[in-house]
Amino acid sequence: MNKIVRGVTGIVIAGAVIAGGVWAVSSGDKAPKETGFKAELAKPDTLTVGLEGTYAPFSFKDKSGKLTGFEVELAEAVAKEMGLKTEFVETKFESLIAGLDANKYDVIMNNMGVTPEREKNYLFANNYLYSPAILIVQDGSNIKQLSDIKGKKAAQTTSSNYGQSALKAGAEIVASPGFAESLELVQNGKADVTVNSDDSWSVYKKAHPDTKLVAIETKDVDLAGAAPMLNKKNEALAAEINKAEKSVRESGEMAKLSEKYFGKNLTEAPKD
């Protein structure tokens, strides 16, 4: 009798173990779905950021080969506020927006100007950088203002807001993959001018004090503050980035990063 009971009990327990194992596996296969802004992330618990990685001082490699820069450290600070890790995807400027469209990353942080054209198709979080536009030419050039570039060759990344401004001003665009290459084209006489931001120029000038290039500030190009750029559908993520940006700004860390990389605070909108 005991043997029979034990046998039956053993079968029942074994069945329970097997059933429990099946339940555990099946429940393990159905991990809880993320909700809120985390449901919009490309990778779990990670803010994936698209940037060039060759655009000092925004994102570049230091002497040890480590990725660093204003936007790298800012992205890390924002992600930390959101309780996320960071992952950077280095991409050429001309392919950055295509990468966002393909969901290769959650956000672009690459000195992206907020323009009406971009706002039609993308979301922007709050601006974190403001810098005047400038014309960079060879010393002695007869270009003194934006209207002078009509019919001239302008070295530009074609999809940038500065490239569009040069095109609207009547310049012939000489396509360039980035700021450093644009300067080289002007320096070598293959282009007459490049339109860009004062922050980028300030860093270049500091590193190349003997350059024969000069910068002319222009107010004819709208001041387009740089901001994180996201897919239109990711409204919850944009809102969370805004909250994190606000915290980083209010703590003073954003201004400190600007001072570190630009030598001045460019994180506040200029007063009229």
Image (cartoon, grey):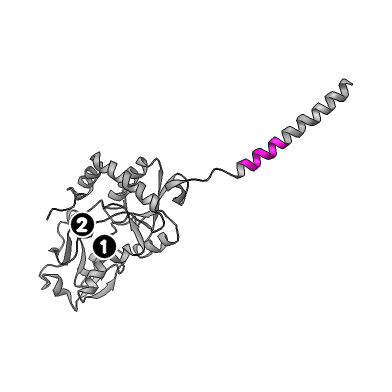
Query: For the point 16% across and 61% down, which residue is it?
Result: 211
Residue 223 to residue 7: above or below: below
Instruction: Tell me if 204 is positioned left or right of 227 in this view.
Output: left
In the picture of the structure, the residue carrying the numbered disc 1 is: 179
Viewer-proximal residue among 29 and 57: 29
Q: Dot 1: few (<14), some (14–19), or many (≥20) neighbours within 10 Å?
A: many
Disc 2 to disc 1: CB gap under 8 Å: yes
In the displayed orientation, state which residue is furthest to the right: 1
N-term-proximal mark, 2 vs 1? 1
Is residue 18 visible in this depiction of the protein?
yes
Distance from Cα at disc 2 to Cα at disc 1 = 10 Å
- Where residue 88 appears, as percent x and y from the top left, is 39, 51
Q: How many marks?
A: 2
Which residue range is magenta in the image?
19-27
Tell me the amino acid under the disc marked 1: Phe
In the picture of the structure, the residue carrying the numbered disc 2 is: 204
Q: Quadrant of the N terminus?
A: top right
Query: For the point 46% across and 52% down, which residue is it?
Result: 42
Query: For the point 73% across and 36% down, which residue is it?
Result: 18
In the picture, the disc for residue 51 is: none
Residue 154 to residue 69: above or below: below
Tell me the amino acid under the disc marked 2: Tyr
Q: Dot 2: few (<14), some (14–19), or many (≥20) neighbours within 10 Å?
A: some
Tell whether position 108 is magenta: no
Query: For the point 31% across and 53% down, which residue is it?
Result: 125
Tell whether position 25 is magenta: yes
- Determine the secondary structure under disc 2: helix
